[in-house]
Image (cartoon, helix red, strand yellow):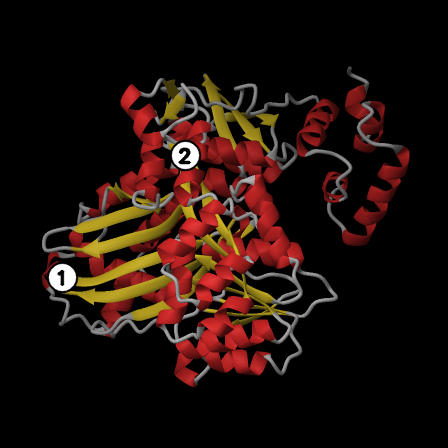
Amino acid sequence: MAKEKYLRLGELLIREGLISQSQLEKAISVQRQEGGRLGEALLKLGFIKEDQLVSTLGKQLGIPYFSLGTGMLKPAADQDLDQLIPHDFAFKNLVLPLSRTMSSLTVAMLDPLDLILIDNLKKITGCDINPVVATKSDITKSIEQFYGKASMLKKAVEASYDVNALDFTEQAREISDEELSIDKLIARAEEAPVVKLVDLIIRQAIDERASDIHIEPFKDRLSLRYRIDGKLYEIPPPAKHLHMSIISRVKILSKLDIAEKRLPQDGAFLVRLEDRVVDLRVSIIPTIHGEKVVLRILDRSSVVLDMNVLGFEQKQLELVRHAISMPYGLVFMTGPTGSGKTTSLYAMLSEIKDPSKNIITIEDPVEYKLDGVNQVQVKPDIGLTFASALRSFLRQDPDIMLVGEVRDLETAQICIRSALTGHLVLSTLHTNDAASAVSRLMDIGIEPYMLAPSLLVIIAQRLLRKLCPDCKEAYEPTAEQLKSVKLKTDLIYKPRGCAKCNQLGYKGRMSIGEVMVMNEQLRDLINQRASFQKLKDVARTSGMQTLYESAIKKVESGLTSLEEALSVTLGAE
């Protein structure tokens, strides 16, 4: 073993059977061209996994390898290790204190050969440093678990109620909103405690998979809420006197007008977290108690644009795939705001995009950037509307067009004419179910003789929260539930709550839908201006599965709870 310590890393990896000689030579070539370390080149080329590399590096150096899976990267309790190495230093340098014995401190490190970092650790802690090696991902996760962003936010919020801690003078607190100058607003917003507080609010929301952050002023308090998996949850709010500073900070980040407090404003900014970029859309409106801000979080890395993982039943997927493979026609996604319509349309585009097809979209806003797709952002203030863009699109030789939403007669007419003249058009409507989309289009002025031949399929969609797989509890439904809901199983599941789902009982969401495929019978009914109920009845006779039936199937499969299914599809039977 002592001999292995002096073997070169590449030789040791070959001896361990983790890479071949040809892979080593290729990695060395890349290292010479791009610089850096051999291990980085091996990882970049995909020849080895991170844990294999770090474990072998530990053998080479004679330094123990610790991993998260074995429980070895868990800092000792009651040793005040978080006081020895502050969170900011640990996160920036990827170091984690594990245990202290007398004057020796065991620290997990990504690079145990970084002598400058080890020297800095000695100065900070006053201890001799005993390094162990771990992977970057394991150290990052362990730091988050040990220091806890939630507890950091809690401390920052508690500090916000301590005026002295935030260095606000009594005189400053007595100044009214109207008396504060722009310079003072900017100065307050840029003060370190406010910057840190806003950063922590955003960071915790992203880590808890929130889709929205609501900061709302009331007479004597602020309200802070996160929307997680479609539900709003209260978070301990900052002190009321920080309201203006927080709003100003958000405005500065979004490049909005700090002085304007009477009119709504919309903006956006990007946040970089480790290896990913998160897009935040900002909406500010004036209320009687001050400005309310909502930040919509668009984390592109957390969205998988794959039709197979959306949640639709296999038969429904086959029907949708057949429709979007057609050379022309109209495909509609329907549902309320926040039901996942746009994500589903993007997943469809990702499946059918091809270098041989010209795909153009017009959206408001462009939520996800797709490679190989020409995406256009609506700008009504300069005359770039859905309708005006669509007229220009037809001169761009498109094969497939995606229209973010049909809002008016002109947009609907252009979509339908495009579908009738050889283009595949995908769009959305705000209706409660698939059949209602037909009535909605005729209500805004579309003639049945144009609508009937253009439609391929109408898909209604909702999102159901998924039960946390680590803590869901099985139980037998009551006789009344079996009778009223017509369950086909004697065992269903309910939420409980655990650390992995933040005690919510649910983790993530999935789609349910009803897919109404046009056939001659339905087209005849459209031409006769039949009611949406008649259309729905005929579609069900033809085999359409309703939203309610889709939700109950998810309950029977153990993917969601009966209460969640009924709350989302109530009245959609």
Estimate the x, y position of residue 443 in percent, counting from the top left. 35, 70
Q: Which of 458 and 214 is in front in this view?
A: 458
Q: Which element carries disc 2, helix, strand or loop?
A: helix
Amino acid at the residue labelled 2: Ile
- Which x, y percent locates residue 469? 46, 27
**In which quadrant of the rendered view does residue 446 lie?**
bottom left
At a point 44% along the width and 75% down the height, the residue shown is 447
Q: Is residue 508 left or right of residue 5?
A: left
Q: Mark 2 points at which residue?
A: 552
Q: Residue 56: which quarter of the image?
A: top right
Q: Is residue 571 visible?
A: yes
Q: Is 478 above or below relative to 139? A: above
Quadrant for the C terminus, please. top left
Q: In this view, does 35 lie to the left or right of 199?
A: right
Q: In this view, does 10 lie above or below 105?
A: below
The three-letter amino acid code for the residue at tag 1 is His
Q: In which quarter of the image is residue 502?
A: top left
- Which tag is nearer the camera, tag 2 or tag 1? 2
CB-based contact (under 8 Å), mark 2 and mark 1? no
The answer to which of 492 and 234 lies nearer the viewer is 492
User: Residue 228's spot in the image, x, y percent?
Assistant: 36, 43
**In the image, which disc is placed on residue 348?**
none
Residue pushed farthest right?
Answer: 22
Mark 2 vs mark 1, CA separation in Å: 43 Å
Residue 319 percent across, percent down from the top left: 59, 49
Residue identified by numbered label 1: 289
